[in-house]
Amino acid sequence: MQNTTRTGVIDIWLPVLVLLSAVPLFAEKKPSGEVMNAEALGKVRSYCIDTSKLAPNAAEAYDAQMFIKAQRGPKELLSKLPWKFFSDCRETHPDARIKVSFKQHLDASSAVLEVTDAASDAVFYRVEALPAYDGPDRNIAFEPQPFSLQRRSVLHTAFGMLISDVQRMSQSQTK
């Protein structure tokens, strides 16, 4: 009797185990941003951050420059990009430019980053980061942050997404 129960369990679970083994347990995570040219993005070794689109709005340009200044340090966010940083896009010759822009929504700003070829301006990668609203219920009214804090926060999120995608791509290329 015990032998038939054991056979019954095997008969039930064997097909399930076979099906599960066909499904990868850790599927490769999709990028946070849009990768237009993975090969070109993989060849980037140096970059600068281009804030020239922000020139008409002094507050946006100031916030972006303060973010870059604060995050350039050795243990800060921008140091996690595996590329050499050039502080000036006009006087240097980096492989890529990271173009920064902001989109204004009703009561919030989002940050848009585009990684482009420095010579041709072809876009390799694009990501937009929206503000994160803390709290257990995102549908309730909230007190929005001042735009200056929002812009720096979404820039941090956007660069974090870029860094994560670049690191993930470089890991998959080495496999």
Image (cartoon, helix red, strand yellow):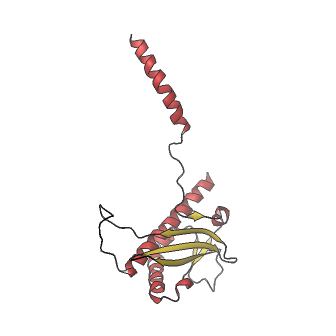
- x and y percentages locating residue 116 in the rendered image: 63, 73
* Image position of 71 (left or right of 113): left
- Above or below 93: residue 77: above
- Above or below 38: residue 52: below
Which corner quadrant of the image does residue 39 belong to? bottom right
Give 109 or 119, whichever is nearer the viewer: 109
- x and y percentages locating residue 27 in the rendered image: 53, 47
Extreme-right residue of the structure? 120
* Number of disc labels: 0
- Above or below 11: residue 71: below
Say whether residue 76 is visible.
no
- Identity of the residue drawn at 52% across and 53% down: 29
* Image position of 118 (left or right of 67): right
- x and y percentages locating residue 113 in the rendered image: 54, 73
Give 42 or 142, whichever is nearer the viewer: 142
- Identity of the residue drawn at 48% across and 67% down: 160
- x and y percentages locating residue 156 in the rendered image: 44, 72
* Image position of 148 (left or right of 54): left
Which corner quadrant of the image does residue 166 belong to? bottom right
Extreme-top residue of the structure? 1
**Screen quadrant of the N terminus:** top left
Give 26 or 76, whichever is nearer the viewer: 26
- Identity of the residue drawn at 43% across and 21% down: 9
* Image position of 75 (left or right of 99): left
Say whether residue 132 is visible.
yes
